[in-house]
Image (cartoon, rainbow, N blue to C red):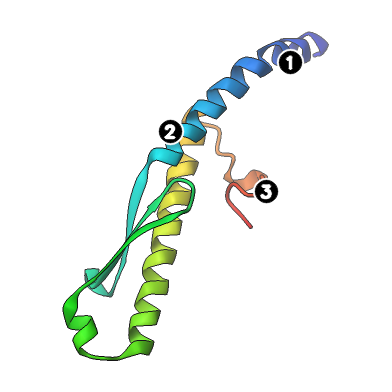
């Protein structure tokens, strides 16, 4: 058991390097969240930054500000969910299939 811990500690710098590389890859990824059947679409990167919003003109023609606000919030939340899923997939690949989503790692899958 102790020898396994020492092996793990020796591999820690290598694992940290791989994890940093994965974080950099995730940061470059972009996902599209949408709502209203595609009437509102947002692009969010792997750092949870909102990059772009696309709103169909017919939504604006209706002049329903409250509906538009709801569609934007819904599209952003959809995009955030997709980024979380992307992170989960990448980290699961890194851990060799170990599902770490239940481990409550602060900032990774939960607030």
Tell me the CA gap for discs 3 and 1: 22 Å
What residue lies at 48% left-to-right and 42% top-to-bottom?
A: 87
Vertical arrangement, residue 59 with respect to residue 32, above or below: below
**Callouts 1 and 2 close, C-beta under 8 Å:** no
Picture coordinates of residue 97, whole percent (x, y): 50, 30
Picture coordinates of residue 66, whole percent (x, y): 38, 88
Between marks 1 and 2 in the image, the one whose residue lies nearer the viewer: 2
Element type at marker 1? helix
Vertical arrangement, residue 11 with respect to residue 30, above or below: above
What residue lies at 45% left-to-right and 58% top-to-bottom?
A: 80
Tell me the CA gap for discs 3 and 2: 20 Å
Tell me the CA gap for discs 1 and 2: 25 Å
Q: Return the residue at label 3.
A: 106
Q: Return the residue at label 2.
A: 25
Q: Which of marks 3 and 2 is nearer the N terminus?
A: 2
Q: Return the residue at label 1.
A: 9
């Amino acid at each position: 058991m102790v020898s396994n811990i020492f092996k793990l500690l020796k591999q820690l710098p290598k694992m940290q390097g791989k994890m940093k590389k994965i974080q950099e890859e995730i940061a470059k990824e972009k996902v599209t969240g949408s709502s209203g059947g595609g009437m509102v679409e947002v692009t969010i990167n792997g750092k949870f930054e909102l990059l772009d919003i696309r709103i169909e003109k017919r939504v604006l023609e209706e002049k329903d500000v409250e509906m538009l606000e709801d569609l934007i919030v819904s599209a952003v939340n959809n995009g955030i969910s997709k980024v979380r899923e992307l992170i989960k997939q990448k980290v699961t690949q890194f851990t060799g299939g170990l599902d770490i989503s239940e481990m409550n790692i602060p900032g990774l899958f939960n607030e």
